[in-house]
Amino acid sequence: MSLLSRIAAPTARHDVARIVAELLAEHPGARPEGPARRTALPTGPTGLGTSAARITARRKDAEGTEVPELYCPPALRDDPALAEEVNTRLLAWAEEIGLYAGRLDRVRAADFGRLMMLAHPDTDDPDRLLAAGKCALAEWATDDYYCDDETMGSAPALLGAQLGVAYAAIDPAHPPLRYVPAVEKAMQDDPVRTALRSAFAHMARYADWSQLARLRHEVAVLFVGYGQEGSWRTQGRMPAVWEYLAHRQINSFVPCVAMTDMVGGYVLPGAEYADPRVRRAVTVASTAATLVNDLYSMAKEHKSDSVEFNLPAVIAAEERCTPREAIERSAAIHDELVRTFETEAAALALTGSPQLRRFLTGVWAWLGGNRAWHSGSQRYASTTS
Ligand SMILES: CC(C)=CCC/C(C)=C(\C)COP(=O)(O)OP(=O)(O)O
């Protein structure tokens, strides 16, 4: 029986985790059973429609309250050796280009290599995971250096100018010849620009032009979100909840999720990625993943001198509720988004191309890996600064 007919069988449950495993089995280079170094997949419910996908992962936030249970798939694999390999290579790259100079211990501890390993279970290739890791770290660095970490030199007044120049790192400026050296110097003078350019160059080994254009677009949108947050900082204004949620759709993990097929080694056709129904599914999932970040990073943001922008803080301000209530309401919003993705992705998987099915299962896997990483990363541990 073909995969498609199994998916389409009327009695079949839309178990995306199982579909992921089947898809992985059908793609060369991806090994669902995995090499010897791979540890067992997590136990427990894994698929779309498995109501028990509620993950208990508790970490204390700054107020001593806990991140509630979240409706989210588990990570589909845990391969510490692969994570370590990717993290080591990522650190070597950051050191080479001067990114997070003097702070590399914290970057190592954050373990972005583990995030890539957890979030992209359909490849074992450390170099593909490294390419995605470089893109993610460069985007995170843009946030840390320019937007929200004053200890890294961020200042709202500089943000727009910095983002404008940083954009040239991913979409090269083409000035008249006499200005080319100045542009080149600007790219090399700043570690964030160097990182963005280098990361895109690495991903270009695996992505075709349409995929790279997609990634560039998503990062440009991310930069719009960074600017929006900077504007709130300048105004000292807390956004409305609806406004913040729209913001967390663009200042979000969409650029990471968008790399799913590039890392997996296939191409989701541009027309399918642009289909509004697919766009909705991808952005809903990415917003949910970003709300996971909000919940786990509360303690870190609490320690910062800048204004805290996370969903619980925004809800508490607008709805005049306790921090605990705001956290619970945020978790409920997260859960609603994950369920929306679950339902709509399952429907899209039935009618879309095999690449779309694989992409959507990859997004589901990304959600699980993202939550697993946030719950364990030192970046969000309340004991670290
Ligand atoms: C990897 C990537 C696309 C990052 C860009 C967006 C971003 C930094 C986040 C979604 C995380 O949000 P936040 O600014 O709250 O980050 P930290 O909590 O400081 O990690």
Image: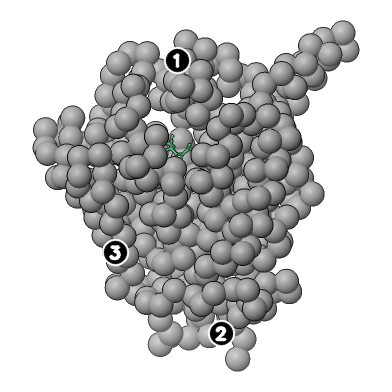
Mark 3 C-beta to ligand 1 under 8 Å: no
- Is residue 114 in sight in this rendering? yes
Q: Residue 116 appears in which quarter of the rendering?
A: bottom right
Position in image of residue 149 (x %, y %): 45, 25
Residue found farthest to the top? 178
Q: Mark 3: give few (<14), some (14-19) or many (20+) Cα within 10 Å.
A: few
Q: Residue 177 appears in which quarter of the rendering?
A: top right
Mark 3 or mark 1: name the one nearer the start of the chain.
3
**Between marks 3 and 2, how big is the CA–CA gap?**
34 Å
Position in image of residue 178 (x %, y %): 87, 8
**Between marks 1 and 2, how big is the CA–CA gap?**
54 Å
Q: Tag on residue 156?
A: 1
Query: In the rendered view, does 80 fall on the left or right side of 124?
Result: left
Question: Disc 2 designates what residue?
Answer: 5
Query: In the rendered view, does 218 fall on the left or right side of 208?
Result: left
What kind of residue is marked 1? Pro
What kind of residue is marked 2? Ser
Mark 1 or mark 2: name the one nearer the start of the chain.
2
Q: Is residue 85 above or below residue 33?
A: above
Mark 3 or mark 2: name the one nearer the start of the chain.
2
Position in image of residue 167 (x %, y %): 64, 25
- Is residue 348 in sight in this rendering? no
What kind of residue is marked 3? Thr
Which residue shows up at 70% across the image and 43% down it?
Answer: 92
Q: Decide: marks 3, 1 in contact (CB < 8 A)? A: no
Q: Is residue 192 above or below residue 84?
A: above
Question: Disc 3 designates what residue?
Answer: 56
Q: Secondary structure at mark 3?
A: loop
Position in image of residue 209 (x %, y %): 76, 45
